[in-house]
Image (cartoon, rainbow, N blue to C red):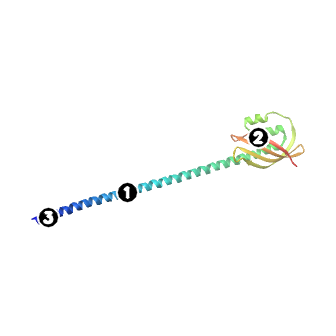
């Protein structure tokens, strides 16, 4: 009987040890699964952050391309307006006709400052050409136009300094230089 009791105790100890081992193994498996799940969630989070960075970068690039496209359209429109304005400014039969022709390109303030609405009654012919239109890289509203002017029997190089305000010419200055 003592032998049976000892065997029974051994069996109980083995069962207890197996139970403890099973619980520890299950706990280890659960801990391992939890660690895998945490790593997985962390990886997903990092991938999401990277995706968001790329999305922001792409959105920024798209916005920049759109802005560049808009700026290019504005610049082309301005250059066309400057070309038309300068052509009318340099080619005329009378100052009054010239002033009427360029009015639409100017702001109200510029018309007043330049005296465009004052009649001059000065009749003489002028012809001119444009050699180039240049935009200031530091001030995108500022342009310089270089050309030639022939009036009253004299030929001059011409520099026209133009500043835009709200897509109209807000100010302009003409400088005539004698050709040598």
Q: Are marks 3 and 2 in contact (CB under 8 Å)?
A: no
Q: Residue furthest left?
A: 1
The residue at the point 87 percent across, 38 percent down is 123
**Residue 176: percent from left, percent from top:** 83, 43
Closer to viewer: mark 2 or mark 1: 1
The reply to whether dot 3 and dot 1 touch (C-beta < 8 Å) is: no
Left or right, residue 141 beside residue 43: right
Task: Tell me the tag on residue 35.
Answer: 1
* Residue located 38% across and 56% down the image: 37
- Residue for point 17% across, 64% down: 10
Choose the circle earlier in sequence order: 2 or 1: 1
The vertical placement of 41 against 143, above or below, is below
Picture coordinates of residue 131, whole percent (x, y): 79, 50
Numbered disc 2: secondary structure: strand
- Which residue is labeled 3 in the image? 6
- Could you say which is closer to the camera, residue 7 or residue 164? 7
Query: Gap between marks 3 and 2, in whole Å?
Result: 114 Å
Number of numbered discs overlaid on the protein picture: 3
Measure the C-alpha gap from mark 3 to mark 1.
Answer: 42 Å
Residue nearer the viewer, 49 or 81? 49
Horizontal relation, residue 26 to residue 169: left or right: left
Residue for point 81% across, 40% down: 98
Which of the two marks, 3 or 1, is nearer to us in this view? Answer: 3
Please, what secondary structure does the residue beneath circle 3 have? helix
Q: Which residue is mark 2?
A: 172
């Amino acid at each position: 009987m003592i032998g049976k009791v000892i065997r029974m105790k051994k069996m109980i100890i083995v069962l207890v040890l197996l139970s403890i081992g099973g619980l520890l193994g299950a706990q280890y498996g659960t801990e391992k699964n939890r660690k895998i799940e945490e790593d997985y969630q962390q990886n997903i989070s990092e991938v999401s952050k990277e995706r968001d960075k790329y999305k922001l970068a792409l959105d920024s690039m798209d916005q920049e391309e759109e802005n560049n496209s808009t700026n290019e359209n504005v610049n082309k429109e301005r250059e066309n307006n400057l070309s038309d304005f300068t052509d009318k400014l340099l080619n005329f039969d009378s100052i009054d006709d010239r002033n009427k022709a360029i009015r639409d390109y100017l702001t109200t303030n510029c018309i007043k400052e330049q005296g465009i609405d004052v009649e001059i009654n000065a009749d003489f012919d002028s012809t001119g050409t444009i050699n180039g239109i240049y935009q200031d890289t530091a001030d995108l509203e500022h342009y310089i136009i270089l050309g030639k002017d022939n009036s009253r029997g004299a030929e001059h190089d011409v520099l026209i300094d133009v500043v835009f305000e709200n897509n109209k010419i807000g100010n302009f200055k003409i400088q005539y230089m004698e050709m040598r």
